[in-house]
Amino acid sequence: MLVVMKAHATEEQVRAVCERIEHFGYRAHPIPGAQRTAIGITGNKGAVEAGTLEEMSGVQEVIVVSKPYKLVSRDVKEEDTEVLFTGSDGSFGGRTLGIIAGPCSVESREQAFAIAERIAKAGARFFRGGAYKPRTSPYAFQGLGEDALKIMAEIRDRFGLRIVTEAIDNETLDLVAEYADCVQIGARNMQNFSLLKKAGRLRKPVLLKRGMSATLEEFLMAAEYILSEGNYQVILCERGVRTFADHTRNTLDLSIVPAVQKLSHLPIIVDPSHGTGKRDKVLPLSRAAVAVGADGLIVEVHHEPDRALSDGMQSLFPDQFDELMSEIRQIAPVVHRNVQEPQGKPVVVKAGK
Ligand code: PEP
Ligand code: MN
């Protein structure tokens, strides 16, 4: 159920409706939009008695949401959600693409700083780096844990980059959230429902990756778990799904980008690194992701990929990341988007303009 408020409904009227909903024992999610506020109702087993809500002042209508997902849906919020970061001009879901880059894993201070310097110079606003790694083998490098988080906190201070890093379980989520600006939930955890709910109680953005075999509906329902707990700052990420294809690590399903955008107001970005598993495929699929209308990219970059402790094969050299940024800067305007220049770089105004 969804209560649509009138365009000029007052804050008191919205609050009164929320109180009435909570009085019924349900949860109210007021979601302000450009035109009007909608209040999503969750926690109800069946239909909510609409009559008492419809009569309240400021209410325009009460509608039944037939889709299984509600809060992520455009029924609740028609316009795109833009996820913002205080003190940064980086964001996801607005006109400017959000670009995240960095190594698969933070391996040392020197490694992370060398890569951060290059990706900042290329214009990225977000640094990615794994501190806790979900590895297929228990013998593979598992990440430096809190030491890596501390290194990334230094990177934020030094380069002004915002930090995106994965929480792999409930036990470490709070610690990761203390350091991260955006908490990543990986493909393997897309249906770890207790982790999703806990991430929903955070008050910072969550990057939710699509599960390896998740349908569109399962993907949106996973996001719904986070929103249903009150965290509306969710960025979706397509990172490839398992298919019979063996020329790439995964099959990057770019068609999910417009499919998500049709149904949901949440931003969706693309991970061409895990999506292809091969360095030489990352640039072409990045171009395609921007062209298809993705709200950003998350790309693995390593200054010495041959020596990387994880995912070296799919990591770009910094020079290749420079090339990627330069190419997507040219493609983005075609789809009415733009890509940031390096921080602090003066804007060049062409003569005659
Ligand atoms: C990663 O980003 O390094 C990662 C493990 O991604 P995914 O969960 O998509 O496999
Ligand atoms: Mn990786």
Image: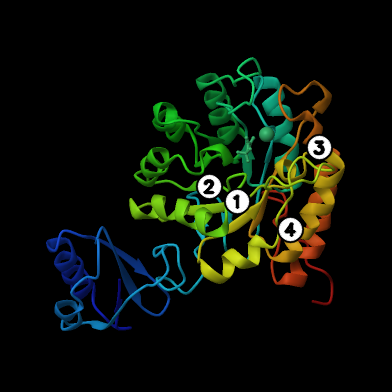
Q: Which residue is mark 2?
A: 208
Q: State the separation of the CA atoms marked 4 and 3.
A: 20 Å
Q: Earlier in the sequence, mark 2 or mark 1?
A: 2
- Mark 2 vs 1: CB contact within 8 A: yes
What is the number of callouts on the image? 4
Using the rendered view, name the quadrant where residue 156 is placed. top right
Q: Which residue is mark 4?
A: 289
The residue tagged with tag 3: helix, strand or loop? helix
Under mark 2, the amino acid is Leu
Q: State the separation of the CA atoms marked 2 and 4.
A: 17 Å
Residue at screen point 74% across, 30% down:
311
The vertical placement of 73 against 62, above or below, is above
Query: Which sits in the foreground, 349 or 315?
Result: 315
Q: Look at the numbered disc 1 and say if its residue's Cβ is closer than 8 Å to ligand 1.
A: yes
Q: Which mark is residue 237?
A: 1
Task: Specify the quadrant that holds the C terminus.
Answer: bottom right
Q: Which residue is mark 3?
A: 318
Q: Earlier in the sequence, mark 1 or mark 4?
A: 1
